[in-house]
Amino acid sequence: MSKLIKPLSVRDVANAKPAERLYKLGDGYGLALWVSPNGRKVWRFEYTRKDKKKDTLTIGRYPEISLADARKKRTEYRILLAHGQDPKYRLEGDNISFETVTAMWLERKQTQVTPRYFERIQNNLKLNIPSRFNGRTITKIKAEDVVAVLGVIEQRGAHEQVNRLKQIMRPRAAGREL
């Protein structure tokens, strides 16, 4: 049986204060406000993919995205799920760029890891992923392109960087990690 969650009020969202650790305030049906120790508030939608794995989609920061706006997005995403589509990969259809996907992934990752580790991930991507991916849609980047980039990095002798980038860029069952 599902756990009943009392919907958030505008006051609950506005009065959410930072704590020592990251925490979330649930609104129900997968929508939650994540409050980080630095005071940042981010709306996220949590759902289960077709392959039965849990996934999270960042909607945006509060107050730029209000409670009402976040609920509208949640409804849109639930409709996509009802039609068998993963909302994460239907955001902009085939027109979603590599930079957009990378920025979304980095925003999500920033609240999941320490600031120092996040900086390492960000620098690794900036230094090792060529600009030729920029401007291309995510669906136009093929496995061969990624393998070629990793091969160049491996020839430099940066084996640890290759392993880290493979972990970041690996394809998922329902789409891409990035």
Image (tube, grey):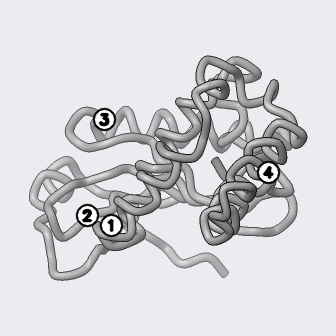
Q: Is residue 104 left or right of residue 107?
A: right
- Say which residue label 1 marks: 25
Q: Are marks 1 and 2 in contact (CB under 8 Å)?
A: yes
The Cα–Cα distance between marks 1 and 2, rounded to whole angstroms, is 8 Å
Who comes first in sequence, dot 3 or dot 4?
3
- Say which residue label 4 marks: 151
| Category of crowding for the residue at label 4, using alpha-carbon neighbours closer than 10 angstroms: few (below 14), some (14–19), many (at least 20) | some
The Cα–Cα distance between marks 3 and 4, rounded to whole angstroms, is 41 Å
- Say which residue label 3 marks: 65
Q: Are marks 2 and 3 in contact (CB under 8 Å)?
A: no
Task: Report the front residue among 172 and 129.
Answer: 129
The Cα–Cα distance between marks 4 and 1, rounded to whole angstroms, is 44 Å
Amino acid on which the number 2 mark rests in the picture: Val
Q: Nearer the viewer, mark 1 or mark 2?
A: 2
Q: Is residue 74 left or right of residue 80?
A: left
- Say which residue label 2 marks: 35
Give the structural element (helix, strand or loop) at label 4: helix
Vertical relation: 25 (above or below) 83: below
Q: Position of residue 123 (x, y in %)?
A: 42, 52
Q: Position of residue 167 (x, y in %)?
A: 69, 65
Q: Nearer the viewer, mark 3 or mark 4?
A: 4
Give the structural element (helix, strand or loop) at label 1: strand
Q: Is residue 10 left or right of residue 7?
A: left
Q: Is residue 43 left or right of residue 77?
A: left
Q: Residue at x 63, y 47 (%)?
A: 178
The Cα–Cα distance between marks 2 and 3, rounded to whole angstroms, is 14 Å
Q: Residue at x 81, y 24 (%)?
A: 140
Give the structural element (helix, strand or loop) at label 3: loop
Query: How many tags in the picture?
Result: 4
Give the structural element (helix, strand or loop) at label 2: strand
